[in-house]
Amino acid sequence: MKINIIGGGPAGLYFAILMKKANAARRIKIHERNGPDDTFGWGVVFSGKTLANLRAADADSHAEITKQFEAWDNVDVVHRDAKISIHGNSFSGIARLQLLKILQRRAGELGVEIEYRSEIQDVESLKNNCDLLLAADGVNSTVRLRYAEQFQPELDVRTNRYIWYGTNQLFHGLTLTFRENDAGVFAAHSYKFNSSTSTFIVECDPNTWEEAGFAQLGDEQTREYLGNVFAADLNGHPLLSNNSKWINFLLVKNKNWFFENVVLIGDALHTAHFSIGSGTKLAMEDAIALAEAFQERTGVDEALTNFTSKRRPVIQDYQAAAFESMVWFENAGKYMHLSPVEIAYNLMTRSGRVSYEDLKRRDPQFINQYELGKSV
Ligand SMILES: Cc1cc2nc3c(=O)[nH]c(=O)nc-3n(C[C@H](O)[C@H](O)[C@H](O)COP(=O)(O)OP(=O)(O)OC[C@H]3O[C@@H](n4cnc5c(N)ncnc54)[C@H](O)[C@@H]3O)c2cc1C
C-alpha cells in the first residue's frame, strides 16, 4: 500500500507512525513545507485520558513524550486579583517543537520517508500516485480548498481575536486570568510546558481590540501593552513572540470527510476552540482512529467509511462542548460582575459537560468554598 501525506504536523506524523508500525511493507511519504526545526506555537496540552490513548497506540513515542512532560491537576481562575484553584483535572504540557521532534524521530526509525521544504500545490498528481492521500495540512488546508466541492467545508470566522505568546513566568496549572482596562476585558489562557516556559494566549472581543488600538501597534508595542494589562500575573517577565499574530478563531467542519482515496484529518477536518483543550490532542486521536480503521478493514473505501462513522460522533460531541466554551469567552464581559469563586464555578461548568456533582467529587474543598463564599 502506498500512502502520501501532506503535512508533517502531529496528525500526519502520528498517522504515518501507526500505519508503518502495523505493517512495515507500507510505503509512506510525508510532504512537509517547513524544515524539521521550524515550528510555531509554544506548548501543547494533553489530558490524562489522551495520554492513555497514546500509550495504547504506540508505547515508544508515549514514553518519550511523557519523559518531557510537565504535569498538573489544577485549573486556576484569576479574577479581581484573587486566585481560585480547582483540583482533580489531570493535564500535562509539552513544547510543540519537542513533540514534533519525538514524532519525526519515531517515524524515521520505522522507515517513513519525510520530505521537508516540500510545499504541495499540485494535489491532484499526488492523489493519482497513491492508494491513500492523507490531508493533514492544517487549518488552512490546501487539499480542502482544492476539493471544496467534494468535502463541502463549513468555515466560520469568529469575532474574538487571540494571540499566542510564551513567557518565562511559570503557571503551575491551566490558568485562566481576567483583566480589565479602559479598552475592555482581556482573558489569558496559560500553562507551563517545560521547566522554564509557559504558553500565554491572550483573547479579547473585537470592541476591546479596536479600543486598544492594536491595528496600529507592532509586535513589540503589542507585547508591551499586554504585558502591562497582565503585569500582576507576569511578575516582571516579558511576553515572548514566535512570529505571534492576532488571529480570528476559524471554526472548521466538513460535510464529507473523504472522497475517493483522499481523507482529511486534524485541523484540516475540524477545529475546536483552544479553551477546551488543544487541537493537537484531537489531531493525534484522529490518527489513532484512522489507523484502527485500516486494521479492521482492508479496502480504502471501507476503512474511510468506517473511520467517518466511528469518529464523527466523537468530534461532533467535542465540537459542541468547545462551541459552548468559545461562546463563553466571546461573552466574557458579561461575567465580570461575578465574584472570583462564582466565575470559577461558571467557567468549570460552561460546556455543560461538568456538573456540580462532578466538581464536588473532584474537589470538595472548592465546592465548599463556592457554597460559602459566593460573595468573596
Ligand atoms: C499560530 C498558531 C499557534 C498555535 N499554537 C499552538 C500551541 O502552542 N499549542 C497547541 O496545542 N496548538 C496550537 N495551535 C493549534 C495547533 O496547531 C493544531 O490544533 C494542531 O497542531 C493540529 O495538528 P495538525 O497536524 O492537524 O495540523 P498542523 O499542526 O497545523 O500541521 C499541518 C502541517 O502541514 C504543513 N502544510 C500545510 N500545507 C502544506 C502544503 N501545501 N504542503 C506541505 N505541507 C503543508 C504545515 O507546515 C504543518 O506542518 C496553534 C495554531 C496556530 C494557528
Image (cartoon, rainbow, N blue to C red):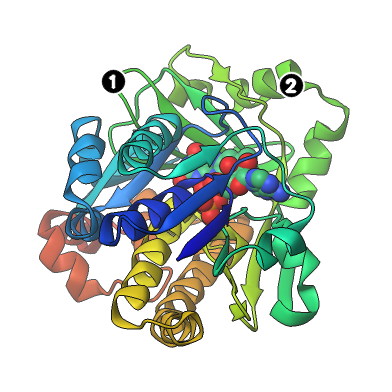
Can residue 203 be seen from the camera position used here?
A: no
Label 1: element kind:
loop
Q: Quick one: 321 or 29, which is closer to the camera?
A: 29
Type of the residue with mark 2? Asp
Whole-percent x and y of residue 40? 58, 32
Can residue 65 be seen from the camera position used here?
A: yes
- In the image: residue 292, left or right of residue 177: left
Type of the residue with mark 1? Ser
Q: Residue furthest front?
A: 25
- For label 1, the residue is 195
Q: Quick one: 160 or 278, which is closer to the camera?
A: 278
Label 2 crowding class (10 Å Cα cut-off): few <14, some 14-19, many 20+?
Answer: some
Query: At x 22% / y 45%, what residue is drawn?
Result: 62
Pick whichever of labels 2 and 1 is earlier in the sequence. 1
Q: Is mark 1 within 8 Å of ligand 1?
A: no
Q: Residue furthest right?
A: 216
Whole-percent x and y of residue 210? 83, 42
- For label 2, the residue is 219
- Between marks 2 and 1, how big is the CA–CA gap? 26 Å
Label 2: element kind:
helix
Whole-percent x and y of residue 134? 56, 62
87 versus 194 height, above or below: below
Whole-percent x and y of residue 302? 45, 87
Q: Is mark 2 within 8 Å of ligand 1?
A: no
Query: At x 41% / y 36%, what residue is drawn?
Result: 104
- In the image: residue 197, left or right of residue 114: left
Query: At x 19% / y 61%, what residue is drawn?
Result: 367
Q: Which mark is residue 23?
A: none
Query: At x 34% / y 55%, what residue is drawn?
Result: 20
Label 1 crowding class (10 Å Cα cut-off): few <14, some 14-19, many 20+?
Answer: few
